[in-house]
Image (cartoon, rainbow, N blue to C red):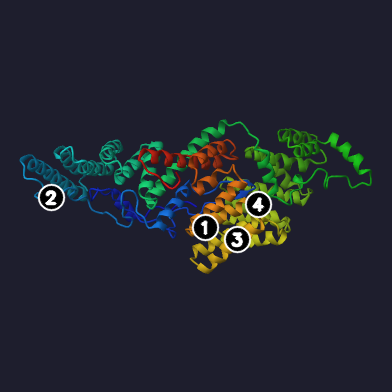
Amino acid sequence: MAASKPVEAAAVVAAAPSSGSGVGGGGGTAGPGTGGLPRWQLALAVGAPLLLGAGAVYLWSRQRRRREAGGRGDATGLKRNSERKTPEGRASPALGSGHPEGSGAHLEMNSLDRAQAAKNKGNKYFKAGKYEQAIQCYTEAISLCPTEKNVDLSTFYQNRAAAFEQLQKWKEVVQDCTKAVELNPKYVKALFRRAKAHEKLDNKKECLEDVTAVCILEGFQNQQSMLLADKVLKLLGKEKAKEKYKNREPLMPSPQFIKSYFSSFTDDIISQPMLKGEKSDEDKDKEGEALEVKENSGYLKAKQYMEEENYDKIISECSKEIDAQGKYMAEALLLRATFYLLIGNANAAKPDLDKVISLKEANVKLRANALIKRGSMYMQQQQPLLSTQDFNMAADIDPQNADVYHHRGQLKILLDQVEEAVTDFDECIRLRPESALAQAQKCFALYRQAYTGNNSSQIQAAMKGFEEVIKKFPRCAEGYALYAQALTDQQQFGKADEMYDKCIDLEPDNATTYVHKGGNMEKAIDMFNKAINLAKSEMEMAHLYSLCDAAHAQTEVAKKYGLKPPTL
């Protein structure tokens, strides 16, 4: 899912000084066929709700598609497909172009003409790679230019910044771009050049603010600025998560979350009602024995606490069963590992999962479930090879386990192996026809395949499939969310908003839905901050920080520049 590097031509455009007095910009349009941007954003329930994918570019994909659909330019009248490869020419009317003949006007035009001539000379030096001489000429242009000619002055400062950029004098780049932006607040070239300089100076927050402004002003259509935004968001997210995660206190998720997690498994012995499959095979008074075992088994006490939603005591009771090497040691290991995962302690969960998997005498359902959970853990840790190995092993030892195919199908989507994902979802549905998640995710996989292949008939078939899924499973929030993403791609924004509203009704605590819908960015920011404290891994926390920072940056930049993106 990593984004590809911008093409060389785009890099040349970024390095060149400005060629016009306005706020033009180079770079191509990042449309549906662009391979360099992470287009597909998934929040699949991999064992537990999990946020995977690149940075937070998807926060802007909806706005970009809205603008493309409406055929509008941006607030500054940018031309998306024009590439400026030459330095700026004249930015003001030529001498004798209709100004009054008074001596003051004549002197002003003379001084402006001389400033333009100095700038043009600097552009020639710039093209020849003589950056020091170019800087001298741009400095002369700045000193000659009348102070009231804001646009011309901003151009001269921006051109000098471009020369400083070639000499890697980043502080000077920031200073000159700042002057240019003060004179022309929506000067995209100066903002983007300053963003790049801030990146070099490791000023991530300032870089994010500038590149976010560029994205909004360009209508989210320039690949270079989108990629830089994605890059700095990832870096900020990782930096913040690393610090917070090492000092975090383990936090038990809400009962609703835990129930939702266990409901994603159907062949999970430890989540079944207490004593099902756990009574002795001996021909005894079942009720009497059950009461006796209940008193002496740490595992069965843990199961009782699960039914009572007293989740904080489960790990300690499982530990008692494990320390005593009791009858239900394998079950206790798996249950303890599961709750370690739920509180975000993967390091503690892995040894328990390893032990269950290695117990050849253990129930095959326990071992398969442990493999699925370890595979999902590897997936969160961005280790797809290990994840694939675990899912494949689970399928080998328990081929009739629907959970294996459901979770492996999700991995295949993330690995862009769509045909294999559909095959796995089909097998899951064959084994478990009432699996709403598998059917919704199969529709999404089919839609993605059709969309990528630009097959209109298959796209329509996939959209019809979504309609059937939400009709059959009206309580499946993910069905509405995935359908809404597809509708957004098809520019059916009104219906997409209806689907997002349905999803919000079912999952009011899901922050990503608010951002996808684009209706309440402030609420999304608040919910992301809450979700950060519940992150199950450092990677998930980093991604949540990226999303939160992206949403916050858009809000602040919109206020600063008097803009109103679709999300506000």
Q: Which residue is mark 4?
A: 475
Pointer 4 or 2: first along the chain: 2
- Badge 4 vs badge 2, beta-carbon distance below 8 Å: no
Q: Write the residue at 72% across / 39% down.
A: 336
Where 4 falls versus 554 (above or below)?
A: below
Q: Nearer the viewer, mark 4 or mark 2?
A: 4
Pointer 1 or 3: first along the chain: 3
- Kindly give the residue lying farthest to the right in the view shown: 284
- Measured as percent of width and height from the top left, residue 476 is found at 64, 52
Tag shown at residue 94: 2
Q: Hey, what amino acid is under mark 3?
A: Glu
- In this rendering, would 240 be left or right of 335? left
Q: Hey, what amino acid is under mark 2?
A: Ala
Q: Could you say whether the residue bearing mark 4 is in a helix, strand or loop?
A: loop
- Measured as percent of width and height from the top left, residue 501 is found at 56, 49
Q: Could you say whether the residue bearing mark 3 is in a helix, strand or loop?
A: helix
Q: Which residue is mark 3?
A: 467
Q: Could you say whether the residue bearing mark 1 is in a helix, strand or loop?
A: helix
| Closer to the camera in the image, 128 or 505 | 505
Q: Hey, what amino acid is under mark 4?
A: Arg
CA gap between label 1 and label 4 equals 19 Å
Q: Which residue is mark 1?
A: 487
CA gap between label 1 and label 2 equals 51 Å
Figure quadrant of the C terminus = top left
Q: Hey, what amino acid is under mark 1?
A: Leu
Mark 1 residue crowding within 10 angstroms, few (<14) / some (14–19) / many (20+):
some
Pointer 3 or 4: first along the chain: 3
- Badge 2 vs badge 3, beta-carbon distance below 8 Å: no
Mark 3 residue crowding within 10 angstroms, few (<14) / some (14–19) / many (20+):
some
- In this rendering, would 180 be left or right of 214? left
The reply to whether residue 232 is visible in this rendering is yes
